[in-house]
Image (cartoon, rainbow, N blue to C red):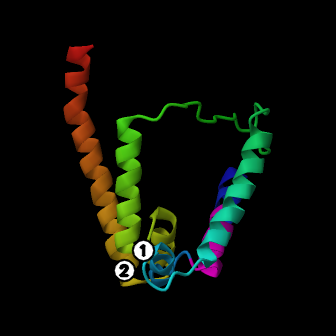
């Protein structure tokens, strides 16, 4: 049941990205280009997503199990540190340069777009580099602790 529900949720999410234009880098870059012919339509998409997420998290915080019976595991971190800020900046720069973030990049890959392939390959390479850097840093963390 979890696999079927996950597949359905992924299909609805991907379809929503296509319908909203989030899988179109030109539309995303038009939204991010405040100095040029700005396209504010994606602000409505983001506002809708934030509203849905807000109410979903509001309901979820009082639950111990999901609707399908899985244990609820919500993030509890509340602090803003250097890694969060730098990661957010890197994400934003990548989104602005490529016109994709991970979800729409995967949708574009699924639609057979070459830009989607390049983006997903670069994203995976970045994830590998991050893991390698973390492995190199972890012995130093243990020594300094």
Identify the image quadrant of residue 124. Answer: bottom left
Pick the front one: 10 or 24:
24
- Image point (66%, 73%), residue name: 16
Q: Which residue is mark 1?
A: 99
Q: Quick check: 88 left or right of 73?
A: left
- Image point (48%, 81%), residue name: 30
Q: Quick check: 10 left or right of 100?
A: right
Start and end of the magenta stretch? 9-21
Q: In the rendering, at what x and y percent does residue 74 appear?
A: 63, 36
Pick the front one: 95 or 34:
34
> What secondary structure characterizes most of the magenta part?
helix
- Image point (36%, 75%), residue name: 117
- Image point (80%, 41%), residue name: 59
Disc 1 to disc 2: CB gap under 8 Å? yes
Report the residue that reaches farthest toward the front: 35
Q: Which residue is mark 2?
A: 115
Q: In the rendering, at what x and y percent does residue 101 appear?
A: 45, 65
Q: Quick check: 19 left or right of 109?
A: right
Q: Is residue 17 magenta?
A: yes
- First in sequence: mark 1 or mark 2? 1
Query: SS for tag 1?
Result: loop
Q: In the rendering, at what x and y percent does residue 36 appear?
A: 44, 83
């Amino acid at each position: 049941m979890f696999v079927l529900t996950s597949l359905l949720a992924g299909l609805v999410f991907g379809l929503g990205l296509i319908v909203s234009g989030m899988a179109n880098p030109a539309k995303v870059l038009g939204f991010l280009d405040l100095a040029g012919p700005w396209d504010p339509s994606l602000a409505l998409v983001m506002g809708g997503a934030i509203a849905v997420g807000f109410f979903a998290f509001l309901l979820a915080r009082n639950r111990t199990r999901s609707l399908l019976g899985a244990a609820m595991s919500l993030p509890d971190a509340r602090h803003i540190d250097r890694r969060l800020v730098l990661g957010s900046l890197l994400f934003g720069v990548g989104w602005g340069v490529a016109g994709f973030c991970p979800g729409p990049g995967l949708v574009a890959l699924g639609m057979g777009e070459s830009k989607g392939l390049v983006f997903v390959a670069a994203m995976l390479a970045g994830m590998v580099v991050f893991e390698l850097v973390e492995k190199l840093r972890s012995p130093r963390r243990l020594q300094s602790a």
